[in-house]
Image (cartoon, grey):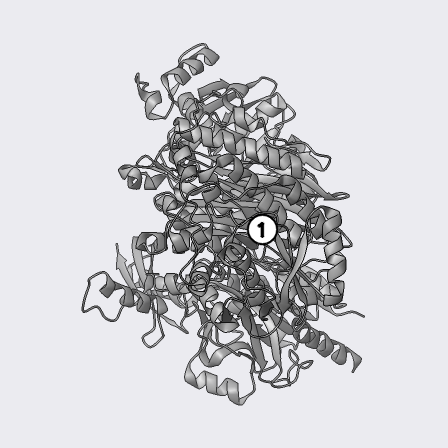
Amino acid sequence: MPFVATVNVMLKDGIADPQGQTIERALPALGFSGVADVRVGKRIRLAVDAADEQEAREQVQQMCERLLSNPVIESYEVTLES
Amino acid sequence: MTITASLHRDLGLTDDEFEQICERLGRDPSYTELAMFSVMWSEHCSYKSSRIHLKKLPTEGAHILVGPGEGAGIIEVAPGVSVAWKAESHNHPSFVEPFNGAATGVGGIVRDILSMGARPIALMDPLRFGPLDDARTRYLVDGVVHGISSYGNSIGVPTVGGEAVFEDCYAENNLVNVACLGVIEHKLMHGRAEGPGNIAILIGSSTGRDGIGGASVLASAEFDETSDEKRPSVQVGDPFSEKLLIEACLELIRDDLIVGLQDLGAGGISCPTSEMTSKAGTGMRVNIDNVHRREPGMEPFEVMISESQERMLVVVEPRHVDAVLAVCTKWEIEANAIGEIVASDRVEIISEGAVVADVPAHALAEEGPVYTRPLARPSWIDELQASPSGDTAPASLESAFMAVLSSPNVASKRWIWEQYDHMIFLGTLLGPGGDAAVIRLPGTEVRVAITCDGPGRYCYLDPYEGARLAVAEAARNVACVGATPLAITNCLNFGNPEKEDVMWQFSETIRGMSDACLRLGTPVTGGNVSFYNETKGRAIYPTPVIGMLGSVPAEAQVRGLAFPTEDEAIVLVGTTDPADFGGSEYAKVVNGTVGGRPPHLDLDKEAALIAFLAHANGSITSSHDLSGGGLCIALTESAIAGGKGFTLDAAGDHTALFSESPSRAIVTCPKNLVGDVIAIAERAGTTALTIGTVGGAELDFGAFSVPLEAAMSAFEGALPNTLSSNIQ
Amino acid sequence: MSTKVGIVVFPGSNCEQDCAKVFGEMGAEPVMVWHADDALPDVDIVVLPGGFAHGDYLRTGALARFSPIMSAVQRHAESGGLTIGICNGFQVLCEAGMLPGALRKNAGLKFLCKWVDLEVVDADSPFTSRATQGQVLRIPINHFEGNWYCEDSVLQGLQERGQILLRYADNPNGSLAAVAGIMNEDKTVFGLMPHPERACEAVLGSEDGRLILGSMIDHVSAKAGV
């Protein structure tokens, strides 16, 4: 079965995110008030073929552990659509 | 796709040009043919407005191996050692999308150099923007610098210098020029498709719809409110592919596997298929089904004119095809045989078994229209030259000095060049921030100097004088670091050539450049013309950027601008004219004026200064050219670079300190050698005068004094203080 | 017999020729090793040079660690051979788990190419033996992702075992504890963001890089002499 996986990779909580901080500082200058907790991450979309959703999820999680994220500084989230 | 009566106009061709195409073909063109002509006959590719003028430039010299008309000029800098040197512009794409526009500009010039068989070894980036108090300008500066940094650093070519100029006239039309130096690694190559029966192989990135008509559309018309809609025409750069392409091509040349190669730039596949055959007197049958593509459903015309980046066309004898493919596989780049060289003079394009274009190669590549555009000296120029030059004395000399020193045009560009890898190849003997960069060519002890100069304000006031001043300053800059000026490339940035005053500026510029190059012995080896730098009818200053190449004689010392030693004498070489304020930094910053006439240049005096700088090599310990901001800025730059102050012997007024008379330099020498230095200057035909002493922690101008620390923080702080506050 | 130095070339590496030139000038014998090979030639030292291996796409070093040669590099290190990762090479070593931590974007969010001063934290290593503790070395950096990070417990262990060899005098990129270069527990693998090969010639601005590269050559010669 084909699945489309979306992986969101974010810096772990507690790891400084200078990109997020810069955006957070910039937004009030553009008139957006009350902005907080800006974090920048990346989204990876991929198609994967697997027997069922369980297998697809396991495959993508392994990809995340081994390549798509760096567990030292990043966390990830997987969503699947068939 | 059907051809409607006005289709050619949508593609940017005039009715007359359409008639010429029909005449060449003896019939109406197919859609694909029309698309191919539209890019190959665009201003950007055909130089139709500039060609008759460019022909007047001096292009020959004993050391010039290849002049204009090829991928890059080739200059022999030492016996058996040759370099490629060329400048390009990516102005319009960089205004639409600064990061990718600037990045792909780097990619394009690098492939030009590579197409000659040269390894690209140094880049320079002359940039022009509007004033930094505008948020959009700061966004452009940040994006352009990041784009150059991202691409240049990744492909492993050092960016060793450039310029950054901020001026109102560039606010809606930034200039992103780039020059590249290469060294012939194995052998000089030519973009020729020799030998019927040989195979044309397309290597590198896949072909997509990105940049369809990009350079030709963007660079061949003025900007207006709809420019944002042109965004899809901007290409996205992939420096990783470019790096692999460089290594693969150099390996193909090293192993003698290819007959010829050419890059795919503006005009896409249409360009090398027609130019390589036209030069070789051959033809090519191309099956575009074999072009590797990144998206389905592309029409033949889209494949033919797509300006997707990081691609080269190589011509290969059949017996070497497998070996060529193997090298490409090793470097993980795609390669496909797309065509065969044939003994006709035509480019024949086949798609899904049908001939979609069949055109004489020469008609596409060489027989584009040539225009003698009307030109006229504008009436406003008299008024401008008669207006005040802005030489009025300041209320406070010290305040004027601090204002000029922290003007973005004068202040340190470290914020920019620290984002560029300027050290890779271990050859950067002098890097950014000096008069010129000095590069030791890999694997040799041969040293060359390169610099870029384009004084737009001078050219605005008088394009003839401005162009002479540009060449003179560039030559002086390479002479200051110890080199002999050898040859120039150029990037000529102008407004709309269909306007008489712009065309007059252009022709005057060519005349001035020509005179200066002849007198200084620096022929033009090629370059680039960028017209239509206008937005809403407002043109930029005429901005010829001169890229000067020099070679450092084997026995000569490389010299920087930094004051090296306490207690040495500071000698001013050349004569100061107190009236040289037109277009000066002082006039603009202190008096808010751009008017009058540019500084007066005597090319004999300039040649004398250059001769002095060569002959004095053993006696002087530093040298620095006097240009924007005049004597006080040159002294301050040398003091900051050396971390040492100075004391002037006599207090000068604002004319002594800020005049921008050309043909001048400050040099330092041990005090006991002052007599020798002055004698060398006089023998060379110029004058020299001791004006002060290096040392201390103050910049003591006599009339006022500033702590070195304060000057340094104004000079180094101006750009970061403005730019770092920007949205990243 | 001269020291043999294997310089691993990934697609996108760009400092390999510079490393070869400098090691050659120091009397060693450099040889290029292609990333797709699964065995190393007979070498004493392995260099993972600077550059943008695989374009640095996804993350710096993330794809290069899976190149076939990396298993051989790991075995080389495990059997006591020296490995140095410079800049991108350091990033690859961290991604491969051969050194702890990770390299994030510079705190200033800009690429930085500049000379920096480095303090030698520990001179008792095969990579710093020619220097003295506390000595200040002038060596340039050239990176966008040099902001080293690890967890507190890991940092503490590194400090206790003397694995931090170089610190920035004026932290240019926000690295944790101003760390510029670290080695593994076995003292066989060293990674640093600064480029010692760019500081091996007075006309380029400094010769301090020779202290690092020369220490490695000394170590190999000493071992061969035993």
Name the spot of residue A28 as percent of width and height, x first: 23, 65
Residue B203 seen from this side: no
In this rendering, is residue B512 above or below C197?
Answer: above
Name the spot of residue C60 as percent of width and height, x first: 47, 63
Residue B709 seen from this side: yes
Q: Is residue B637 left or right of residue B25?
A: right
Return the residue at label 1.
B576
Name the spot of residue C106 as percent of width and height, x first: 44, 68
Query: Measuring 67% from the left and 48% from the top, which residue is drawn there?
Result: B609
| Chain of the residue under label 1 | B
Query: Measuring 51% from the left and 44% from the top, which residue is drawn there?
Result: B454
Q: Nearer the viewer, residue B207 or B430?
A: B430
Q: Is residue A4 left or right of residue B586?
A: left
Q: Nearer the viewer, residue B365 or B207?
A: B365
Query: Measuring 70% from the left and 71% from the top, which residue is drawn there?
Result: C44
Give the total number of marks visible in the rendering.
1
Please, what is the three-letter code of the amino acid marked with disc 1?
A: Thr
Name the spot of residue C72 as percent of width and height, x first: 61, 67
Quadrant of the snapshot with the N terminus of chain B: top left
